[in-house]
Amino acid sequence: MLKVAQSQGVGLGCYVNLKTILEPFSELSLGKSGYVSLVDQNGKSIGTLTEKGIVTDSSKLDTGNYTFRQELSQAPFEIRIKISWTGVLNLMTGSVFALLGVAFLMVIAGSVLLFHLETKILKPVGMFTENLQKYDNGDLTYQMSEGNLVELERIDDKFRNMIHQIRRLKITLYEQELQKQKIEMDYLKIQIRPHFYMNCLNFIYSMIDFGQYDHAKSMSRITSDYLAYIFRNTSEMVPVTAETNHCENYLKILLLRYPEKFTYYFEVHEEVENAVIFPFLIQVFVENAAKHALTLETVPLISVTVYPEDRGDEKYVNIYISDTGNGFPEETLQRLKAGEDISEHGKHIGIENCLKRFRYYYGDSGEIHFDNSPLGGAIVDIHIPYRTGGEEHETIARG
């Protein structure tokens, strides 16, 4: 293709080989009757590309029947393209096969992904959820098959450890509850002393026989209150004032039977009147002091004081029990200080049982100290957390 321009006697020409323009179109799938033609301004083909190559004689081609036409503003020709049905089908076939290939690969990839999701994630998660439901229904036989989901295995390990700790804790609490019930029953057996009650009844009968009706009435009321406290309060926590009243009833019974053998003094500070303790915590030590007082030639004083005590941010109750008798035997005192069992040969069973209950109810949060006063007499110094009736079950230490 030659283009010549002339101006003021000067000519300028440009020669372009049509092959360089048409060859790029050879990449198209034109089909058997398809072509790419360069048509001049007069509608004459100046160069045509078919599936057989570039042809110079395009008279046999119907360049007026084209699929696509593009005029060029800077060139003296336009481009006309015709794609036959065979070309379109070839193009579509290639595209279809390409799409089918992509779809097939997507189906394969999706199947592999679903299989992995089912076996490695959904199934382990389903088993984990099922075992959680079993545990929620009370079945602690937790078992889960091994999987390859690292995160779930870690959760599973943590959950196994938690289940193991819960089972162990339940067993421990169950054993502690059985131990508590045994301790309470043992202490109740200690409190139920037929000889003591028979002596009380005989004494009441004797007072009536001698016409001492007021004394018999007083003895009957005190004995009744004493028995009622024992049978009503074997395991529930009781107010300090209820415990000290019970101790006073016991001492009054003894003084009615053994007048002027000892004196006693009780004082409970108003700030701790509502504090609760386990039953017979004070009574067992008061009873021990009273029994020794009956054997003395002097008249000892048995004293019980209950006062509030501040320990850091927590409020405590100090129960101080003392007497002016001979005090603890040295061997017994040393064993008490060392926390050793003192119930050998059937002695001090009540004190030993009380110490077991003390450790059960208060654990490390409670303290109990034993000593002998330099002036004579035994001292029992108790320190326990201040608790009221509505909170003792939530805060009792379990050791």
Image: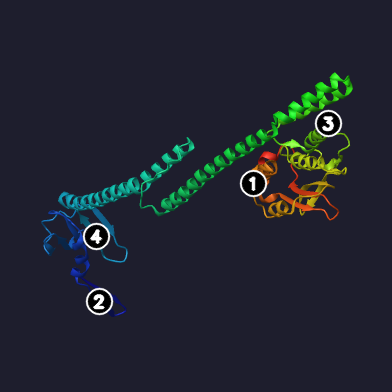
Which of pointers 3 and 4 indicates the residue nearer the eye? 3
Label disc, if present, on residue 228 of the rendered structure: none
Which of pointers 2 and 1 indicates the residue nearer the eye? 1
Marks counted in the figure total 4
- Residue 341, given in percent of the width and then of the height, sits at 64, 49
Tell me if label 4 and label 1 are in contact, CB under 8 Å.
no
Comparing 292 with 378, the one in front is 292
Please tell me which of labels 2 and 4 falls first in the chain.
2
- What's the distance in space between the residues labelled 1 and 3, CA to CA? 30 Å
- Residue 253, given in percent of the width and then of the height, sits at 82, 31
- The amino acid marked with disc number 1 is Glu
Which of pointers 2 and 4 indicates the residue nearer the eye? 4
Comparing 286 with 399, the one in front is 286
**Pointer 4: what residue?**
79
Numbered disc 2: secondary structure: strand
Tell me if label 3 and label 4 are in contact, CB under 8 Å.
no
Numbered disc 4: secondary structure: strand
Report the side of 140 relative to 39 (left or right).
right
Numbered disc 1: secondary structure: helix
- What's the distance in space between the residues labelled 2 and 4, CA to CA? 22 Å
**Pointer 2: what residue?**
13
Which of pointers 4 and 1 indicates the residue nearer the eye? 1
> How many neighbours does mark 4 have within 10 angstroms: few (below 14), some (14-19), or many (20 or more)?
some
Location of the N terminus by quadrant is bottom left
Please tell me which of labels 2 and 1 falls first in the chain.
2
